[in-house]
Image (spheres, coloured by chain):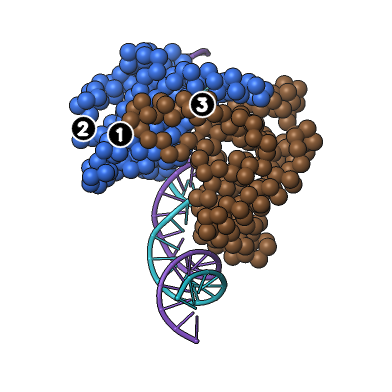
Chain colours: A blue, B brown, C purple, D cyan
Amino acid sequence: MAQHPSHQDESHHVGHDQDHSHDHNHNHCIDSALATAETLCIEQGQRLTKVRRRALELIWESHRPLGAYQLLAKLAEEGFNSAPPTVYRALDFLLGAGLIHKVESMNAYLGCAHADKAHKGYFLICDECHNVMEFDYQDIHAALIAKAAQQGFELRAETIELTGLCAECKATNTSAANTQGTRT
Amino acid sequence: MAQHPSHQDESHHVGHDQDHSHDHNHNHCIDSALATAETLCIEQGQRLTKVRRRALELIWESHRPLGAYQLLAKLAEEGFNSAPPTVYRALDFLLGAGLIHKVESMNAYLGCAHADKAHKGYFLICDECHNVMEFDYQDIHAALIAKAAQQGFELRAETIELTGLCAECKATNTSAANTQGTRT
DNA sequence: ACAATTTTGTTATGATATAACAATTGAATC
DNA sequence: GATTCAATTGTTATATCATAACAAAATTGT
């Protein structure tokens, strides 16, 4: 069900248009994500309609978290309806199915690298280049559940958004402006 | 500098208009927070002007995270300027000084219970009553720094927003609708 | 008082998201 | 195939959250 070999604490790099050779083939990610989505939806009797499917693809194709209106523009280019409810409905569906995350601090949407129903969204967000890396961390997950339970709180979803400076920007920043300034 | 005895992993309850007898005197929190704010600002040569000070008070007086426009309305009632930049400037200042947090998933603002410059915002947010409890957890903090460093990422700020069902709502929910439905 | 800086006032607009209701499509049954 | 019901999409309007840009006023240091 997961599109990556299931390491316990794996990380998934999102972004880096210019250089993802060190990473993996992003097209493979998209294909896997879509396949997973199909399976999940069928299993749950939900309909991955044209606009929902295409929205998911576009989100995956984007190398950064995608804003709702950015996504809407892309959909409109392809002949889909261009009114906001179109995109928000697709996003709601995909969020509900656990196929994407919302990065709250960016008001932007990102393919879920773990396609689970656990609603965990753990992100490293670079202040400079705005690339986002999703990570998983079972120990943290367990600790948070325990901490919540200790307060009598029943945990349903977790959002962790860590901001700072990514490795690339830390390197380039000291010498010159980084190469990832463009956004789209 | 902290307004609570400095437990390692303390929790601070925000909310519960009807019942905070089990908790502590909220007025004390406000007074302490304001005193801390004064001290911090003086130390750093920053000016806690009337509108900034009153904004901070109002945020603390609110028993739930306060939206920018809610705060703006309260300020306007008291004769402050009623245009959005007024409130966003105050919020920016208070955020920058580490005196408040933004709850990203609610677009709302909350007094920082630890008045530190570490920019940690760890929250338990109830889906039902929308009360928010801030907590601190040094082990998680350390683990996140380590995890980030492992990716070459230099951590600057942390946001953890955990949603689910609080103890009160878990109890009341099973029998009847909870008593905290109103939103100010 | 004067100049420099910070803060606030003011107008306008941008960006994100939802409400409400009509029209269409899909799926299940007759 | 026609009928019915539910889910999805279209459409218009509006709510909510946030910032740009520049003018006016207040504060600080000299």
Query: Which SS class for mark 3?
Result: helix
User: Is C1 located above or below residue A179 in the figure?
Assistant: below
Q: Which residue is mark 3?
A: B140
In the rendered structure, the residue with mark 2 lies on which chain? A
Q: Residue furthest right?
A: B21
Q: Amino acid at mark 2?
A: Asp
In the rendered structure, the residue with mark 1 lies on which chain? A
At 26% from the left and 38% from the top, the residue drawn is: A171
Q: Which residue is mark 1?
A: A167
Which quadrant does the C terminus of chain A fall into?
Answer: top left
Residue A19, which numbered label? 2
Q: Amino acid at mark 1?
A: Ala
At 21% from the left and 32% from the top, the residue drawn is: A19
Q: Is residue A88 left or right of residue A31?
A: right
Is disc 2 on the same chain as disc 3? no
Residue B111 at what x, y percent from top left?
61, 45
Residue A96 at what x, y percent from top left?
48, 26
